[in-house]
Image (cartoon, rainbow, N blue to C red):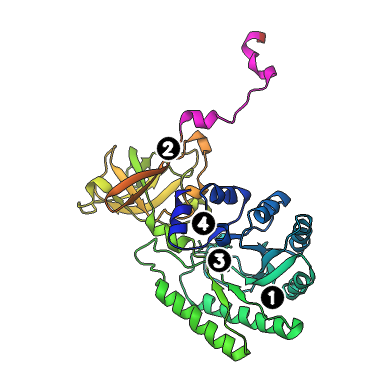
Amino acid sequence: MASCKIVEQEGLWLDVCTGGELHTALQAGFPTERLIVHGNNKSDEEITESLKARAALIVVDSLQELEVLNGLANDMGCRAEVMLRLSPGVEVDTHTHIRLGHVDTKFGLSLANGLAMEGVKQALALPNLNLRGVHCHIGSQILELRPFRETVGLMVEFMAQVKTETGRELEDLNLGGGLGSHYLSEEPPPSVNKYAEAITDVLRAALIHHGLKEVRLFQEPGRSLVAEAGTTLYTVGVIKDIPGVRKYVSVDGGLSDNPRPALYEAKYEAIVANKANLPAAEKVTIAGKHCETDLLIQDIDLPPLEPGDILAVQTTGAYNYSMASNYNRLPRPAVVLASGGQAEVIVERETLSDLVRADRIPPHLKDTRATG
Ligand SMILES: Cc1ncc(COP(=O)(O)O)c(C=O)c1O
């Protein structure tokens, strides 16, 4: 909830994509006139709660959802402000699991096969929807500007087609997120300024070219806002040197607090916090404590390590805590906000009691020892 507060204080809008995220935003008192609701499979309850909360915009992901949303808005006697998520078919060079703007995707309606235009026409015809604009999100951890430029061109071209075919000039364009973060020294992402320039240059030129008015431009940077703000601290435990093979250094977390290496082959850099001034002296592999190989970082040069050292893995502010689980019954770590020499806990460390809080033992399993 503290991060919702920071987003609010920075004057940003907030995206939610589940009822749980919506609940968190509402509990944090986030102003709902700056709330956008996403999701490719929103439940009736999630839609109803979003309408009740008067979220600024609902991004509709399918033809089916258009009908459902229209019906629920009708039941509630309101009109939903909507954007339609489109899939522009832009190829991006990122991991396949986070490459989202192409035709074969569960997200949005494709520009290429006509579903996007069908969706727009359907949305315009439904009485309880007010179609404000179009949305797309082509993927995540994108390190080049070419796909973003291409996307803007395609989306504006589509908005021009909408004007020609329906007479309606859409006022909102949402380009989603995707700008990469700096995980490895040798793979810097484009700066935010370069990214913004690239998008606005193409946007202005395309709007003029198609004779369209200026649009309200939305962008949804997630990772690039928060990833580099996060560092995960682990304590070094067992160190196992397999002569001639490799040296494994195990830490007190792993897959449960950071599934990204396993999911996306994500790579990280780290320092030893209590030996930050010492030069690298050996190549090691950092492993977690889970029941799989669970490697966090392979072949990293670090100062000589001993049990009890604190390993600081950098750029873990995005898709880490939010993806954490209790796999192997590990309690999730605390989250600490550090700024200007001050540190405050914003999410408490989970306890062993938290791990069994939701567990129930049915009566017939309770007395197994007595009955043998
Ligand atoms: C619709 C939408 N917008 C924005 C984002 C944020 O993406 P990123 O963190 O890559 O900027 C996501 C991530 O999944 C998304 O699904």
Q: Does the magenta stretch include residue 188?
A: no
Q: Mark 3 points at which residue?
A: 139
Taking the image as shown, residue 19 lies to the left or right of residue 251, namely right
Marks 3 and 2, how far apart in space?
A: 32 Å
Q: What stretch is highlighted in magenta?
A: 351-370
Looking at the image, is mark 2 or mark 1 nearer the viewer? 2
Secondary structure mostly seen in the magenta stretch? helix
Marks 4 and 2, how far apart in space?
A: 26 Å
Instruction: Point out residue 271 in the picture as x, y percentages from the top left corner.
Output: 29, 52
Identify the amino acid type marked 1.
Leu
Q: Is the residue marked by circle 1 packed among few (<14), some (14-19), or many (20+) residues within 10 Å? A: some
Q: Mark 4 points at which residue?
A: 264
Q: Which sits earlier in the primary sequence, circle 3 or circle 2? A: 3
Q: Is mark 2 within 8 Å of ligand 1?
A: no
Q: Of all residues shown, which one is farthest toward the front?
A: 77
Q: Which sits earlier in the primary sequence, circle 2 or circle 1? A: 1
Q: Which SS class for mark 1?
A: loop
Identify the amino acid type marked 2.
Arg
Marks 4 and 1, how far apart in space?
A: 27 Å
Identify the amino acid type marked 4.
Tyr
Instruction: Point out residue 130 in the picture as x, y percentages from the top left corner.
Output: 71, 69
Q: Which sits earlier in the primary sequence, circle 4 or circle 1? A: 1
Q: Is mark 3 within 8 Å of ligand 1?
A: yes
Q: Which sits earlier in the primary sequence, circle 3 or circle 1? A: 1
Residue at image x 49%, y 80%? 200
Image quadrant in which you'd find residue 33: bottom right
Q: Mark 2 points at which residue?
A: 349
Residue at image x 63%, y 73%? 89
Identify the amino acid type marked 3.
Gly
Quadrant of ligand 1 in image: bottom right
Q: Mark 1 points at which residue?
A: 111
Q: Is residue 360 magenta?
A: yes
